[in-house]
Amino acid sequence: MTTSSRSSHPTDVNWQSFAAVYDVMAEINPAYRELNEAYRTFLGGLQLRAGDVLVEVGAGTGNYTVAAAEAWPACHVLHVDASDEMNARARSKRAARGLGNLEIRTADADTLDLPDDSASLITAVHALYAFVDAPAVIRRMFRWLRPGGAVWACDPCSPLDVGEWQRFIFKSSCRERGVLRTAQLFWRARDAARQNRRIGRALEGGGYWGYKSELFVFKVDATSVTDLGASTRHVEAMLSRCDALVLECNHDERMLADGRYPGWLKARIAGPFGHLANAAAAALLAALDCSRLRHVIAAHLSAANNRPELARAALAGALGCDESWIGIADQARGFDWREL
């Protein structure tokens, strides 16, 4: 998980210690690898210009800033984290890849300020919950964002069953690497397990922030909606009369229920802080004023729990249009350019 300074925060998580084993845990966590791939796909679909500024707050060991710098070598990527140890590991990755467009800055996101309308992309992965005043950081993020810019934010937001999550990772790693190699990796990453348990206790006890999805929605002509979990009237008001919509259709409810995921993960995906099912995405779309809508793209489809034809049928049914009019964002290739 990525970090901010915790000197004034009422938890006992040692982010400097976490840095030493963070990438080991990331390596053996299939959900984290899937998130990395989704982010690289997202980066490939952006329309950026040479000199654009891409910012990540709570950037940790640099997995996402490195990806951004590699994907957009003509852009300036700003990596911001309060942990010297996290940043040292990010600098090693930068040096190994020769990324001259990646700036690494030691700073606390709770006090960081950037010029208004200066960033084309702002990223925050597993970081917002740990900031002292996350809503204030989010307000500044949108002030930094230029018109037409994008935000990629992913956060746990609610208490985690750390033990069950670790068992899921252990079983997945055993299938990929075998029991011995997995046991060695878990031993190396044992401090990360301790830190994750502390994070779980802090989330459960209210020591960390749990978000409301409305904070991430704002009025634009073209917008992307993923990881919403559940819609609200505010969300519907903000998305109405947009010209283009990239809408999460993460899973088919029946496929998820009958699938191989453990029960706790199914509950998280289907819950109010998880992902939109095809039917939920269709209900959201049906509630919008679509009088200006020219493009709809179904996105973030689960490879295990959805199929493109199911997502297409659900959204087409909500709009009363031909299924072929609904676009699909491929996990590897994104989608073709659209003219607005």
Image (cartoon, rainbow, N blue to C red):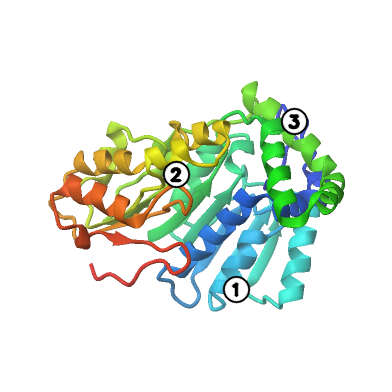
**Can the viewer see residue 241 in this picture?**
no
**Location of residue 212 in the rendering, given as x and y in whole percent from the top left corner:** 45, 33
**Location of residue 133 in the rendering, given as x and y in whole percent from the top left corner:** 58, 35
Q: CA distance from mark 1 to mark 3?
A: 34 Å
**Quadrant of the snapshot with the C terminus:** bottom left
Image height check: is 4 above or below 336?
A: above
Q: Which residue is labeled 2 in the image?
A: 227
Mark nearer the N terminus (1 vs 3) = 1
Q: Which residue is labeled 1 in the image?
A: 70
Q: Residue at x 57, y 71 (%)?
A: 76
Residue 155, quarter of picture:
top right
What secondary structure is marked by label 3?
helix
What secondary structure is marked by label 1?
helix
Mark nearer the N terminus (1 vs 2) = 1
**Location of residue 229 in the rendering, given as x and y in whole percent from the top left corner:** 42, 37
What secondary structure is marked by label 2?
loop
- Tag 3: amino acid: Arg
Mark nearer the N terminus (3 vs 2) = 3
User: Badges 1 and 3: C-beta atoms under 8 Å apart?
Assistant: no
Q: CA distance from mark 1 to mark 2?
A: 25 Å
Q: Is residue 23 left or right of residue 293?
A: right
Q: Nearer the viewer, residue 184 or 211?
A: 184
Instruction: Tell me the number on the disc at residue 198.
Output: 3
Q: Is residue 174 left or right of residue 130?
A: right
Q: Residue at x 20, y 57 (%)?
A: 323
